[in-house]
Image (cartoon, rainbow, N blue to C red):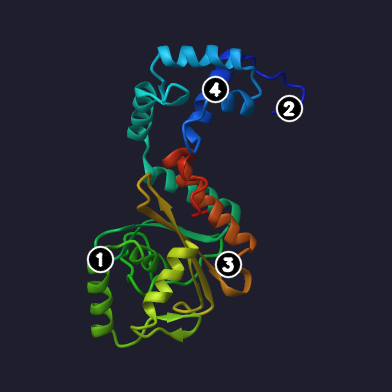
Amino acid sequence: MAENTPKRQGIGSLEIGLHILNYISVASRPPTLKELSGALDLSPSRAHKYLVSLLREGYINQVNNTQYTLGNSSLTLGISALRRINPIQLSYEAVDKLQEETDKTVSVTVWNGNGPLIIKWLDSSQPISVNVRLGAELSPLNSAAGRIYLTQLPAKRRKELVDEYYKNSKSLPKYRGKPLTREELPPHLEAIKRDNYCAFFSDYLPEINVLSRPVFDINGSIITVITLLGLERDTDIAEGSVLFEQVRECCDRVTRQICGQQRENDGRG
């Protein structure tokens, strides 16, 4: 928008009311009138008038006679919004943008019960040579996305998959070029869960780096995993690198779209 384009005129009082509602929705505990007026730079008498209107319409409730929390009308709005969210489509749109910004190969996977299933794959302008494509099922241990999903599985199911792998596979899973024994895998998965990403540095695909991060739903469950792949020589995915931050922001943005502000400051970013 050009700088000389006039700002669209809105209804200031409505915006103030919504600011109050937003503040109540993200507060760690139900705020008082004093807290609201101070945080939003409103006089107590003016803030009280807005609160009365929000109470009348059911968007907030008063608790303990002095504090305010969300009401049934806000709950109805939230449920209605959740019903209209399509997490898969949001992930698709996010990787479209990520691929355009980075010109790297990107993918979206979902968990199919046994491993990650690739449901979207976009090649870079210089496609890399890999033997996986749209519709492929990846290994739960030999893929970065698979290890992320493993961290969220119930302990019994995770143990079944891990035991099956170590029993039937001819080689150990790798990380940073080194094999992972059965005893070394649990702390490795814990680190992935703590750091909220998994990265391979030419571990499985020669001279190819891989970075995967999860997208969460409102219950904290992984709904998709977004992955970026590129040649080692021009794909720096080390923590803090430009590509790392682009993937992080991509996944965090989708999570915020799905969950709203609730998960912005939950430590997963």
User: In this view, which residue lies farthest toward the right?
Assistant: 4
For the residues bearing labels 4 and 2, Cβ distance under 8 angstroms? no
- Near-viewer residue (4 or 220): 220
Q: Which residue is mark 2?
A: 2
Residue 11 visible in the picture: no
Residue 41, above or below 266: above
For the residues bearing labels 4 and 3, Cβ distance under 8 angstroms? no
Q: Disc 2 and disc 1: Cα gap in Å? A: 52 Å
Q: Disc 3 and disc 1: Cα gap in Å? A: 27 Å
Residue 23 visible in the picture: yes
Q: Which residue is mark 1?
A: 114
For the residues bearing labels 3 and 1, Cβ distance under 8 angstroms? no
Q: Which residue is mark 4?
A: 33
Q: Disc 3 and disc 2: Cα gap in Å? A: 36 Å
Quarter of the view holding residue 163: bottom left
Residue positioned 54% across, 56% down in the render = 248
Q: Secondary structure at mark 1?
A: loop
Quadrant where the N terminus sits is top right
Amino acid type of the residue that numbered disc 2 sits on in the rendered structure: Ala
Instruction: From the viewer's perspective, tell me whether residue 145 is left or right of residue 31.
Output: left
How far from the left and from the top, in percent, is residue 169? 28, 84
Amino acid type of the residue that numbered disc 3 sits on in the rendered structure: Ile
Residue positioned 33% across, 66% down in the render = 150
Q: Which residue is mark 3?
A: 237
How far from the left and from the top, in percent, is residue 3? 76, 27
Residue positioned 55% across, 61% down in the render = 104
Q: Nearer the viewer, mark 3 or mark 2?
A: 3
Q: Nearer the viewer, mark 4 or mark 3?
A: 4
- Near-viewer residue (59 or 258): 59
